[in-house]
Each structure stands twice: as structure tokens, then as C-alpha cells.
Image (spheres, rainbow, N blue to C red):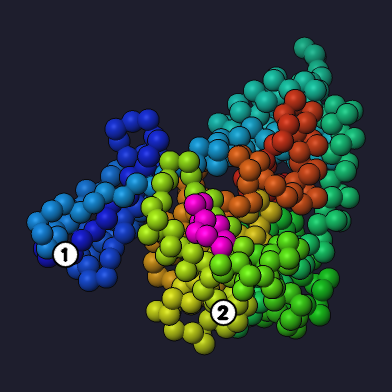
Amino acid sequence: MPFSRIALYSVKGSGRRRHGPLWPLVCFFPGTQMSPVLYNLALNASLGCGDSWVQVRGKTSGGRRAKKKVYHRVHELDRVMDLQKKPATILQLKNIIQSQRTQSILLRDLEKEVGFIQKWNLMAVIEKYPSVFRVSGSNRMPISVRLTDKARKIADEEYEARELMEPILVRNLRKLLMLSIDCRVPMEKVELIQGELGLPGDFKRSLIPKYPEYFSVKDFCGKPILHLESWDSSLAVTAREEKLAKEGFLESGDVVKKAKISKDGNYTGPYAFRICYPAGFRPNKGFLEELQKWQRMDFPSPYLNARRFESADPKVRKRVVALLHEVLSLTMEKRMTSSQLDALHSQLFLPSRLLLCLVKNHGIFYLTNKGTRSTVFLKEAYVGNNLIEKCPLLRFYDRFMALTGRRNTNVSTAISSHMRLTL
């Protein structure tokens, strides 16, 4: 079976000989010829669909083995996925209690709400955090659980936080539709990412009809499609451009051109991205020179229609990076699962080799398979494992979780998913 050079990506810093736990990444270079069976196997492995390492041997013109490339892990971002597990369970139980008419729930009824296995996780949380949950009952009375007075007082602030979130949600949803082809997205795909955007569980009834000047829902082939009613040029500005404008760098490109090559790859120009390489990555001078050329290169706005451009153009490839950067910036926690990004593939006109694009730009994005799903992070949004800018809803979550003695909590999208189930 003839095929050209294939680069295998392993993980540095896993502490073991095996290449994990980050999913194996397989990079196919132009000219690769591969059987459909091997291609699908490698693709599934690269998307985190298995724990096996795909051993693909490559031939080179000189008979030498292809050089192995290393994908450096960022342990702080891996830890973000671990830190979200306990808050997700606590907030899930809070929502279950608040959904009850009596603002309490019998322990024997927990299994009806969450199932047999998850019931034991909730019971462990109830026992561990008496500052949040109060248990009452006796031998003659069934045991029930409710929020403590202090926890209930903070929980009542959620309504105010969601009120503050509404204009942010409307703005971000409009921007997402402006990024998509023909300014429309199937409703089922909006529902898929509603937790990441911070949309309430009943947004189709409570939010969309409230703004008919911005949104409309139309049927296409029997499926509801969310349409943008009016284009707003003032919203066609990316988060990267807004940040550069605040720092005064949008008009400083000609001045900074004479600066020396940055050792960390960062460049303060109007078309530059914030780069944050992991500690173990040591770029050489040639790499940094090419990176600076790329940082200076102009590119079309992500808000322009992608059909107008040729995908092979280097400027258009940089536009794809800007598009992914903007989509992640629209989420509450500046991250999405790889399956959610892939679901928006046709609406955003993403490249066929999306995984390769993310890996090549590992100074801007970070991929991890920690947790139940593989996740893509926007690296500049985090300092260590802490999210820099938090929306009102995340700040509310942090105040509630402070009752458990937890500080600087990063609440993951799993929490939003749990909340949708109880709204």
C-alpha cells in the first residue's frame, strides 16, 4: 500500500511510555494515499474515539523514518476539566431541589431524577457539604434534603444574573448567525451548543420570540432553522479586534514592523494573535521568523461570506484561525467540545482538516481529551486554570460554590448541560 510521509503526534509530559491521555493526532500531508479502512481508523483515533495508538509507518525518499512530532500538554488546562466535576454535581442537585414545589426532595426520589448510579454521587455531595444542603427527617418521617438558608439566599440571585445575561446572549447569538453562511443555523445545532453560549433551557420560547427584529424561525425540509432578520455592521467586529482597539494596537502596525523578532511569537500588530506556547516548546529562529511573517499578514474578516474566498490562499487560512478564535470567544468559558465545532462545520464553512488547523496553531488553541469529551480551549482566555473574564452567570456560580470553601472556581459547560435538564 503506497503512501507518503505521515507525521505521528505523541504527548509530552504524560509521565508514561504510552502516548496519552491526549488522543493520538495523525497528520496527513498532501499526496497521502491511504485505504478507506486505515483512513477511518486513523481519523477516529485522532478525534478521540479510541484509546489505541494508531501505528502508521511512513516511507521517505531517503529511507529514513519520519520525524516524530510532540504535542505538548498544558496541565493547567487539563486540570480545568478535572475541577468542573464537583461543581457540576452540586449545581445539578441545587436545580433539582429548586424545581420541586416544596423546595425539597426526598432522598428516595433522587433515583427517579438522575438514575441509580448518579444518585450515589449526589448523596455523597449532600454528606460532604452541610453548608449547602440540609438533611431532615427521622425514623417516622422520610428523609429529605433542602438548601440551607445561606445557600437559598445566594441561589435567589440567579434570576438577577440571568437578567444581566440576556443582552449578552442576544448579542452573541446575533454574531454567531452573522458568522454563518447565509446567516442561518439549524435549531438543533443551536440547541447542541446552548450550554456553552449560556442560553436558558427554554430559549426557544423565552428568548427568540422576544426579539422578532433580530431572529425568526423558519422550516426548511421539515426542520426549524434560526434566521438572522437584520445585519448590524457594528457587531461585525471580532473579540480580537476589540481587545487590540482597547490596547491601541490596531493602528500601530507600521511602527512595530521594525521591532526585533519576539522570542515568544507575540507581535503587537493589527493582524496579530496572542500566542501562548507551553513551557516545553522551544521554537528555533527560523520558526519564529515564519511566525512573525504570519502575524503581520493581513486576512479577510471572519464576518465576510466565506464563499468569496479560495481556501488555498494563505490569507484565507489565517481567516479560518480568526473564525475559530471568534466562535470560542462567543462562549461563556471560551471553549467547546470538538464534536460541537464539527457540528457547525457546514454552517461556518470550516476546513476539512479542522483538527490539523487546531494542532498547527497550538499557541492559540489547546486540545485535551480530559473529561468525557475532547475539548478545544482558547488559550489566551486563561491564566493557569482560571478564566480571566467571567460573565454574570459564571460569577453567580462562583459565589454559590464559595459556600463549599472553593475559590476561583471555573464552572464547565457540563454545569450548563445539567441546568438545561432542570429548567
- Residue 80, quarter of the rendered image: top right
Q: What secondary structure is marked by label 2?
A: loop
Question: Tag 1 or tag 2, which sits nearer the N-term?
Answer: 1
- x, y (%) of residue 177? 66, 74
| Horizontal side of residue 73 vs 335, given as left or right | left
- Tag 1: amino acid: Phe
- Tag 2: amino acid: Pro
Q: What secondary structure is marked by label 1?
A: loop
Q: Quadrant of the N terminus?
A: bottom left
The residue that appears at 14% across and 59% down in the rendered structure is 59
Residues under labels 2 and 1: Cα distance? 35 Å
Vertical position of residue 417 compared to residue 29: above or below: above
| Horizontal side of residue 91 vs 131, given as left or right | left
- x, y (%) of residue 142? 77, 21
| Residue 300 circle label | 2
Viewer-side label of 2, 1: 2
| Magenta span main SS | loop
The residue that appears at 52% across and 87% down in the rendered structure is 308
Q: Nearer the viewer, residue 415 or 61?
A: 61
Q: Nearer the viewer, residue 250 or 135?
A: 250
The answer to whether residue 10 shows anywhere in this view is yes
As drawn, the residue found furthest toward the bottom would be: 308
The residue that appears at 86% across and 56% down in the rendered structure is 163
> Label 1: which residue?
3
> From which residue to which does the magenta span run?
259-267
Magenta region includes residue 123 = no
The residue that appears at 40% across and 56% down in the rendered structure is 285
Vertical position of residue 316 compared to residue 241: above or below: below
- x, y (%) of residue 121? 61, 28
As drawn, the residue found furthest toward the top would be: 139
- x, y (%) of residue 41? 27, 55
Mark 2 burial class by Cα count in 10 Å: few <14, some 14-19, many 20+: some
